[in-house]
Amino acid sequence: MVVKKFPNGDKYDGGWKNDMKNGEGTLVYADGGQYAGSWIDDERNGHGVNKWSDGRVYTGDWQDNKQHGDGTMTYNDGGKYVGEWENDMRNGHGVNRWSNGDEYDGSWVDNERQGQGTFIYNSKGNKYIGEWSENMRHGYGTNTWANGDRYEGMWANNEKHGKGTLTHSNGSKEDGTWTKNKLNNAPSKDVQAATKKFNSKDALQFKGLWLNGQPFIICLMPRVAGCSYQALAREYLSSLNWDKEFFDHANDRCYCSRCYKETWKDVIDAGNSQYVIPRGWVRFGLQLDPVI
């Protein structure tokens, strides 16, 4: 056992052999950080704890002076990773918890989510289970949203892309082939059945207004058996070729008498009881003139 001070300000207390750090020892860095653990020929090898001056702490396996094997990294913002490491990077299986509450449990390659894994978006209440590539949903997977919507199918670069089914909280479905979050195939059976009852282009009415300081669209249509209002409204809007960035379908909600069981006092008056209001498509930046 020796105690040595180095010209750069570092201080070592521990095993010493062949004029190098060997065995168990603690190196206190000049910047305030330190390593306590096993050494082989001046390199961190085996099990040890490294504390950085910025507050990060790694406890686990080391190989050739790098984090390699099983280990836990606690980040200075409160986040934590527990799992496998290779060459100072998250590689293999591990669980990463971010300071905002998000959590990923799955496969890693060179510090990126790659392969099979589950991501829980704590701040939004959403969840994805499936394949990943370069930190993005890519391949087959299932995403559930806090509003009850669920998509199961193919993804590419974080977008619905390929065969898949989007099931809305009201039970309606959009099934087929997707391209960059847009459904390409023919209307669903529910939409076709509803369309047979009336011509949507003649019967649908759209009104733009401002509500609580936000641009807002309501869709009015005659009552039909069952509930195909949202799906039919989406189909009609798609036929207008409006910019998809105008709309946020996560906020879609049907206010027909079948889906909406609460009071109608807070529902915008359609002006005529023969209409119902599937309300949604709220999006900041939608260019509409306020209705007085």
Image (tube, rainbow, N blue to C red):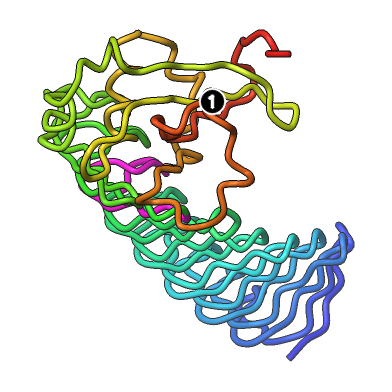
Image location (x, y in percent) of residue 255: 45, 43
Q: What is the residue that sits farthest to the bottom in this orientation?
A: 1
Q: Magenta span: helix, strand or loop, mainly? A: strand
Q: Where 92 falls versus 224 (above or below)?
A: below
Instruction: Classify residue 83 as left or right of residue 193.
Output: right
Q: Is residue 117 left or right of residue 152?
A: right
How many numbered marks are there? 1
Residue 18, position in %: x, y?
Answer: 61, 77
Residue at horizontal 45 percent and vertical 75 percent from the top? 70
Q: Is residue 49 visible?
A: yes
Image coordinates for residue 190, horizontal then vertical, percent: 15, 37
Residue 88 seen by the camera: no
Q: Secondary structure at mark 1?
A: loop
Question: Is residue 113 positioned above or below 136 on the image?
Answer: below
Mark 1, other Cα within 10 Å: few <14 / some 14–19 / many ≥20: few
Residue at horizontal 44%, vertical 64%? 85
Q: Nearer the viewer, residue 161 or 77?
A: 161
Q: In which quarter of the view is residue 148 placed?
A: bottom left
Q: Amino acid at mark 1?
A: Gly
Q: Is residue 180 positioned above or below 118 on the image?
A: above
| Residue topped by disc 1 | 271
Please name whichever residue, 269 or 239, is drawn nearer the observer in this view of the structure. 269
Quadrant (top left, top right, bottom left, bottom right) of the C terminus: top right
Residue 182's quadrant in the figure? top left
Q: Is residue 253 magenta?
A: no
> Is residue 139 a member of the stretch shown in magenta?
yes
Asked whether, in this view, residue 205 is left or right of residue 262, the answer is: left
User: Which region is colored magenta?
Assistant: 132-146
Residue 181 position within the rendered picture, expressed as x and y whole percent measured from the top left = 32, 29
Compare residues 77 and 267 and report the one nearer the observer: 267
Q: Residue furthest front?
A: 273
> Which quarter of the rendered picture does the N terminus lie within?
bottom right
